């Protein structure tokens, strides 16, 4: 039984190249995560606190952007090729986007890591949220721009493959995995417009010194125009694995192909016009626009809840085919010894918990309670840090043998690894959420204040810190086990049947569903209209207030100009 | 290979050739019975999702106490 590498060796090499970059980033990013977890809890401090931002930036960029998106590019390449059952149109184009994205990622990483070497006059301590007024070295922004353009080319590669397939199959429904790739990429093209404009037109000229000022709120808004949809760019590969691979691993079949298509269409429509929900506390954006963003965000719960139903039902189908009975007892019939299944199932369970804290973040009122506290990293370590990352690692146990023709080195180590990740994240994320409710800040090496004590609703701050340190350590051990297992798998001898790579047909296929679901032009047009409605007036207001380049008097100038009046008013204020 | 519809026999016919007991993704080897679309009633899914909604409701009540009763109002007043 030939597997992917036997049928499409060149495409398998492309996928392997993206996964190598992805997993290297995972290793470095995980090490930085361990350093942070031990540093800010005070258990082990190997760096000065002034270097904390460098480590934090490296952790965020390498994991949230490089690890996830390189894995996505590999997975989507595999998905398009295997679901269309044809090679990519021009392998040189494929290697071109691999080269461009890799070079861009290396540039960005070098600019960040140079911050740890004092003798090199270069740093990019700008966090994952790279907007003004924090400024990085130009190499960082140039690397990001190359990376973004590389992802656009990757999308073009997949659309060209689809066009060729469509030419030969004019009346067929788009194969489900290719449909998922195309809708995700349409969302990505739309969402990256914001960050591309911010990076190319503002941040690169500003970092080179060609322009003296930029409008921070404008770069911030353009960042979040991309900065929230990118969440779905991480999440969609995980969804693809949950919808198309997880049911098979459970021994079942996808419950409904049309429902899966509806979910991906909804993400295309709803992902982008929501970014302002990251800016509830920003001055300069009217409350009404924030309210619209909140409403749009709450709509996003719909595809998530549809997914919860469809994916769980598909797993249940597998359990019942394996002899499972009862209301709850069927869970015991699932293949819990399979690391690919268990990892993805645990990731899905954590995503359900992340959905709760996400609703808190999205609510305009209650967001004020947790904004800029440790709650927020607690939330996204459940979503991107577990739902996405754990699914990608678990999926690799099933995917990598198809790309190498070699079996997984150790299934028990894989099982231990995914369970360790789950346990580590339960400890760390739980502690972060509760720390956030107590008001402990995020993004700082020194979260404690003098003469101030955080009061917790449950437990103590010391116990929260222990949870973060222990959880972070388990997560690092888990990442090392994963890389160890994949590395040893790659040097195994090839075997004839390294993996069962067949994907069964859905219980309810696409043939009976409305054809309009496959009308990508229509959905894209509606998505564009929604973005225009959500963003035109806020952006016009931001530019109208402070100009495109932010050429308005700054706050210190105003204070200086009114110093006498401020001093005169001071006794009254104090009284 | 494609996820698009195949006949049931096409999906199942290669099962005996697979190595057993080690390969990741070998769950179909232990399938005891075929359940089609019409015989499948996802009642277990309903139970799990209802459980999730109960947890959500409890957590929202917890947040209500944290936000409004634990520390006073942070938004109004």
Image (spheres, coloured by chain):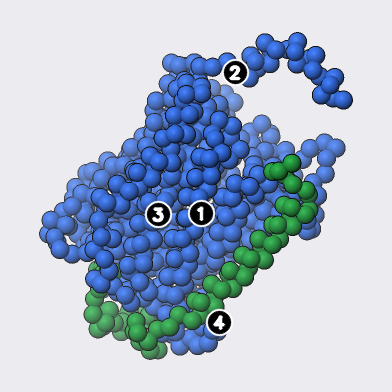
Chain colours: A blue, B green
Please check whether the numbered discs 1 and 2 fall on a single chain. Answer: yes
Q: Residues within 10 Å of mark 3 (few under 14, many from 20)?
A: many
The chain containing the residue under callout 2 comes to A
- Asked which secondary structure carries label 1, the reply is helix
- Which tag is nearer the camera, tag 1 or tag 2? 1
Viewer-side residue, A342 vs A188: A188
- Asked which secondary structure carries label 2, the reply is loop
Please check whether the numbered discs 3 and 4 fall on a single chain. Answer: yes
Q: Position of residue A525 (x, y in %)?
A: 29, 46
Q: Residue at x 40, y 63 (%)?
A: A241
Residue A298, label in figure: 1
Q: Residues within 10 Å of mark 4 (few under 14, many from 20)?
A: some
Q: Earlier in the sequence, mark 1 or mark 4?
A: 1
- Asked which secondary structure carries label 3, the reply is helix
Residue A328, label in figure: 4
| 3D distance between C-alphas at marks 1 and 3 | 12 Å
Q: Residue at x 60, y 18 (%)?
A: A554
The chain containing the residue under callout 3 comes to A
Q: Which residue is mark 3?
A: A267
Q: Position of residue A111 (x, y in %)?
A: 49, 31
Q: Earlier in the sequence, mark 4 or mark 2?
A: 4
Q: Residue furthest toward the right?
A: A575
Q: Earlier in the sequence, mark 2 or mark 3?
A: 3
Q: Which residue is mark 2?
A: A554
Viewer-side residue, B55 vs A538: A538
Q: Is residue A300 above or below residue A574?
A: below
Q: Residue at x 21, y 52 (%)?
A: A161
């Amino acid at each position: 039984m030939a597997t992917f590498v036997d049928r499409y060796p060149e495409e398998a090499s492309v996928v392997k190249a993206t996964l190598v970059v992805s997993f290297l980033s995972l290793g470095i990013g995980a090490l930085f995560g361990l350093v942070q977890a031990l540093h800010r809890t005070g258990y082990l401090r190997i760096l000065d606190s002034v270097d904390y931002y460098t480590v934090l930036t490296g952790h965020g960029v390498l994991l949230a952007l490089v690890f996830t998106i390189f894995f996505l590019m590999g997975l989507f390449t595999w998905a398009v090729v295997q679901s269309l059952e044809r090679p990519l149109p021009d392998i040189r184009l494929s290697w071109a986007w691999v080269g461009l994205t890799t070079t861009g990622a290396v540039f960005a990483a070098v600019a960040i890591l140079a911050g740890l070497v004092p003798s090199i006059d270069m740093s990019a301590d700008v966090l994952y949220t790279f907007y003004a007024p924090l400024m990085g070295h130009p190499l960082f922004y140039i690397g990001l721009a190359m990376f973004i353009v590389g992802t656009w080319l990757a999308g073009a590669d997949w659309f060209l493959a689809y066009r060729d397939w469509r030419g030969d199959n004019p009346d067929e429904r788009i194969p489900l995995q290719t449909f998922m790739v195309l809708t995700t990429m349409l969302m990505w093209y739309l969402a990256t417009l914001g960050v591309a404009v911010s990076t190319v037109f503002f941040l690169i000229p500003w970092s080179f010194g060609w322009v003296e000022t930029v409008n921070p709120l404008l770069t911030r808004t353009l960042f979040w125009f991309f900065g929230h949809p990118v969440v779905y760019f991480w999440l969609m590969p995980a969804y693809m694995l949950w919808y198309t691979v997880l049911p098979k691993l459970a021994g079942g079949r996808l419950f409904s192909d049309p429902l899966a298509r509806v979910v991906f269409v909804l993400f295309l429509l709803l992902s982008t016009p929501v970014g302002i929900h990251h800016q509830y506390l920003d001055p300069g954006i009217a409350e009404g626009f924030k309210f619209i963003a909140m409403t749009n965000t709450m709509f996003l719960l719909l595809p998530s809840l549809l997914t919860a139903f469809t994916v769980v039902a598909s797993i249940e189908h597998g359990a019942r085919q394996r002899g499972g009975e009862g209301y709850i007892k069927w869970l015991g019939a699932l293949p819990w010894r399979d690391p690919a299944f268990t990892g993805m199932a645990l990731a899905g369970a954590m995503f359900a918990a992340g959905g709760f804290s996400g609703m808190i973040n999205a609510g305009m009122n209650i967001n004020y309670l947790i904004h800029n506290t440790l709650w927020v990293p607690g939330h996204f370590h459940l979503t991107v840090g577990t739902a996405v990352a754990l699914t990608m690692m678990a999926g690799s146990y099933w995917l990598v043998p198809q790309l190498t023709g070699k079996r997984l080195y150790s299934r028990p180590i894989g099982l231990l690894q995914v369970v360790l990740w789950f346990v580590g994240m339960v400890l760390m994320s739980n502690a972060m959420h509760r720390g956030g409710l107590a008001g402990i800040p995020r993004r700082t090496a020194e979260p404690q204040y003098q003469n101030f004590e955080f009061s917790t609703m449950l437990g103590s701050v010391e116990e929260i810190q222990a949870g973060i340190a222990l959880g972070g350590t388990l997560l690092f051990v888990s990442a090392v086990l994963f890389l160890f297992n994949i590395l040893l798998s790659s040097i195994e001898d090839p075997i004839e049947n390294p993996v069962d790579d067949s994907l069964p047909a859905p219980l309810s296929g696409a043939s009976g569903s409305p054809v309009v679901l496959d009308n990508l032009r229509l959905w894209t047009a509606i998505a564009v209209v929604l973005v225009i409605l959500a963003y035109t007036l806020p952006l016009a207001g931001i530019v109208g207030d402070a100009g495109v380049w932010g050429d308005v008097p700054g706050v210190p100038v105003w204070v200086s100009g009114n110093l006498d009046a401020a001093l005169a008013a001071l006794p009254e204020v104090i009284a | 290979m494609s996820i698009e519809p195949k006949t049931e026999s096409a999906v199942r016919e290669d099962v005996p050739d697979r190595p057993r007991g080690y390969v990741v993704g070998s769950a179909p080897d232990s399938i005891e019975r075929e359940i089609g679309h019409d015989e499948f009633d996802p009642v277990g899914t309903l139970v799990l999702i209802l459980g999730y909604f109960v947890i959500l409701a409890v957590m929202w009540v917890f947040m209500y106490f944290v936000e409004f009763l634990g520390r006073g109002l942070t938004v109004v007043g």
